[in-house]
Image (cartoon, rainbow, N blue to C red):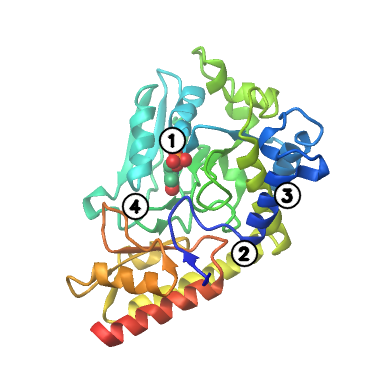
Amino acid sequence: MKEVFNFSAGPAVLPKEVFESSAAAVKNFKDTGLSILEMSHRSQEIMPVMDEAMALVTELLNLPENYKVLFLQGGASTQFLMVPYNLLDSQAKAAYIETGTWSKKAIKEAKLFGNVEVLASSAESTFSYIPKVTDIPGDASYLHITSNNTIYGTQYHNFPETSVPMVADMSSDIFSRTFDVSKFGLIYAGAQKNMGPAGITLAIVREDMLGKVKREIPTMLNYQTHIDKVSMFNTPPVFSLFVAKETLKWLKNKGGVAAIQKINEAKANRLYEEIDSNPLYKGAAVKEDRSFMNVPFVMTKEGLDAEFLQFALERGLSGLKGHRSIGGFRASIYNAMPEEGVTALIDCMREFAKLKG
Ligand SMILES: *Cc1c(COP(=O)(O)O)cnc(C)c1O
């Protein structure tokens, strides 16, 4: 079978090595004669998978001791409500910045729990930029941001300056670059963009964020439950956890987050250079806020979109169709997208422009 490069936004590309070790674990896990799919999460073979995954997160992000790593279910979408449930008292206020579909959804949920102040929004320009916010109310319980906007291809390259603890949805750029964790009270990410398969959600919680709201929190939605039970209060999705753990191990072997960041920047810069210099293509986001993970672009000539997608597919380039809310194309170039994939896309864009430009 010829090589296919997967540019899908999520579930997304994973390293080939991870598919190999995950397939082997399904057939016979650690020489037990059992599949990882049929083993107790409390068995002596599976417990270390959780420990290793947590240790890898701690090491790769260089987490200080007062941060707890949790593996949860329900996707980032459940974090939209778990965050205010646990952190926002009904009389208190949380600040949000609206930079796209995902932050809009987070805002909607937060309003069910307390007062929400939306400090800024780039909705009026189809979320093509990250609004600069300097006036952050000091009495907010937290400031919520979406660090990378998967659909619109914008990313915070400088986080807001504030003494208010930040909460970040990092679903589509966690482990893609280094950052100062100490500015954040809570970070969450669905795994299926940049750290594994669907079915598991990472949450990183600074301990002092918890225990401040007066309401009763249902057991499963209470971060403290999962801290106390080390993410084994109920049955975790063991296989998703294993695949995420293998992906993090792959990243560590690549040299870790700082090393992959260099590669990510190089990949993105090459692709943006092509978009900027080739008259047939145009980027969707403003230059200074462009994402290194999701690269949306459109064609400057009409009526060629379907043809380009087919042209790309014939060259082994899959998943390039843009999100329905902005159309055109989107190349998601997460950690596991090899540099050769980006080269193949650039070659394809040039070839197509020669024929149709
Ligand atoms: C995909 C995505 C989500 C939604 O994640 P689910 O795991 O499907 O709930 C939320 N936020 C961002 C930034 C995303 O990219």
Respond yes or no on whether mark 4 lies under 8 Å from ligand 1: no
Circle nearer the N terminus (3, 4): 3
Drawn side of residue 302 relative to residue 155, left or right:
left
Question: Which kind of residue does numbered mark 2 sit on?
Answer: Ile
Q: Residue at x 37, y 63 (%)?
A: 320
Distance of label 2 from label 3 (alpha carbons): 15 Å
What is the secondary structure assignment of the residue under circle 4? loop
Q: Position of residue 296 (x, y in %)?
A: 35, 63
Of residues 285 and 315, the one drawn nearer to the viewer in this rendering: 315
Q: Residue at x 54, y 65 (%)?
A: 337
Q: Position of residue 207 (x, y in %)?
A: 64, 30
Q: Quadrant of residue 155?
A: bottom left
Residue 131 numbered tag: 4
Q: Residue at x 29, y 87 (%)?
A: 354
Q: Which residue is mark 1?
A: 77
Question: Which kind of residue does numbered mark 3 sit on?
Answer: Glu
Q: Which residue is mark 2?
A: 260
Question: Which kind of residue does numbered mark 4 sit on?
Answer: Pro
Distance of label 3 from label 1 (alpha carbons): 26 Å
Label 4 Cα crowd, 10 Å radius (few <14 / some 14-19 / many 20+): some
Respond yes or no on whether mark 1 lies under 8 Å from ligand 1: yes
Location of residue 306 with respect to 92 vertically, above or below: below
Distance of label 3 from label 4 (alpha carbons): 32 Å
Distance of label 2 from label 4 (alpha carbons): 27 Å
Circle nearer the N terminus (1, 4): 1
Q: Which residue is mark 3?
A: 59
Kindly indicate whether the residue at mark 3 contacts the one at mark 2 (C-beta within 8 angstroms). Answer: no
What is the secondary structure assignment of the residue under circle 2? helix
Label 1 Cα crowd, 10 Å radius (few <14 / some 14-19 / many 20+): some
